[in-house]
Image (spheres, rainbow, N blue to C red):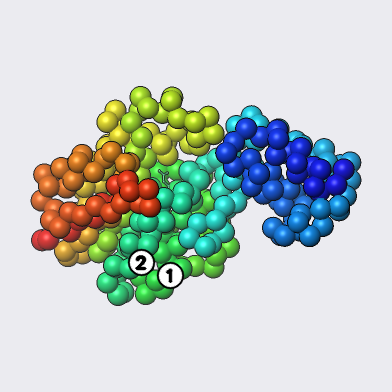
Amino acid sequence: MTYKEAYEKGKNMIVSEEAGSEALLLLEYLMNTERNDLFIHPDRILDETKEKEYFDLIERRQKGEPVQYITGRTFFYGLEFVCNRSVLIPRFDTEILVERIIKTAPFGLKLLDLCTGSGCIALAVKDQRKDLTVVGSDISKEALDTAKVNREKLNLDAEFIQSDLFENINEKFDIIVSNPPYIERKVIEGLEEQVKDFEPRSALDGGVDGLDFYRRIIKEAPLHFVNDGRVMFEIGYDQKEGVSLLLEENGYKEINTIKDLNGLDRVVTAVYER
Ligand code: GLN
């Protein structure tokens, strides 16, 4: 079978809006090729072994497994990250938070990324802002192992600490950021299969109202600031009111929301003055 035939057949087997690009990503992954190879060499032959392997990958995708877990990699903020089932797949939406951190963090400060998962926020920030000291933490050892692999591969300097939010965090920071689990518990069962059946529950479940992590972080962060501090969170599209209220109740000022490219509330920032 040729590349092109395999790709066309694979594409038709995947039920997804992204079927074309997913079938291509799986082919590239298997053949270790670049994006253009399929188009330049559509008649190149997949031998029988490779053909079988390709359709095994397609079958995994058909059963709902996200492409990023099958290939073990994804791109975030222009960097390649390793990902696996111990971490949430880095989302394009989260680049909004990263961009805001990169653009607004004052020179030379210390930043903590809670619920770091794959380390995508911490490492993308560090990549662009070498002046910042970056620490990431997560409750899951497996997630941190993945974050550390990413740190080595990207050759970036960041510290990763296993901790249930602030529990094992002894240093103090100027900026505390997080994209914590924020899905309302009862909503999880209604999510797409590739999310609810494959991504870690612990990376999705934000408690009954989805705000559990914001509640804890907002309350405890003031104890972990060097001086005046700021918090920056990714939020769910309907969580602006809830998170802003928690910030107000805990004495934060300058509460701002940033929308994503779809016009949905995506990031909340605030300042805490001592
Ligand atoms: N901070 C990580 C990310 O943005 C993990 C988020 C999570 O597990 N909820 O991808």
Q: Residue at (17%, 54%) from the top-left corner?
A: 255
Q: Position of residue 71 (x, y in %)?
A: 65, 47
Which quadrant would the N terminus be assigned to in this image?
top right
Position of 96 with respect to 17 (left or right) is left
User: Residue 219's x, y, as percent?
Assistant: 19, 46
Residue occupying the point 28% across, 38% down: 238
Q: Is residue 63 left or right of residue 187?
A: right
Picture quarter with the C terminus? bottom left
Left or right, 60 with reference to 172: right
Label placed on residue 128: 1
Amino acid type at mark 2: Ile
Say which element carries label 1: helix
Task: Count the numbered circles shown.
Answer: 2
Rendering quarter of residue 154: bottom right
Q: Which mark is residue 46?
A: none
Q: Position of residue 168 (x, y in %)?
A: 33, 50
On the image, numbered disc 2 is attached to which residue?
A: 102
Picture layout, residue 11 above or below residue 160: above
Residue at the (20%, 39%) spot, across then down: 242
- Secondary structure category for the residue under label 2: helix
Pointer 1 residue Cβ closer than 8 Å to ligand 1: no
**Contact, mark 2 vs mark 1 (Cβ under 8 Å):** yes
Residue nearest the observer in this picture, 266 or 213: 266
With 178 as the anchor, is 38 left or right in this view?
right
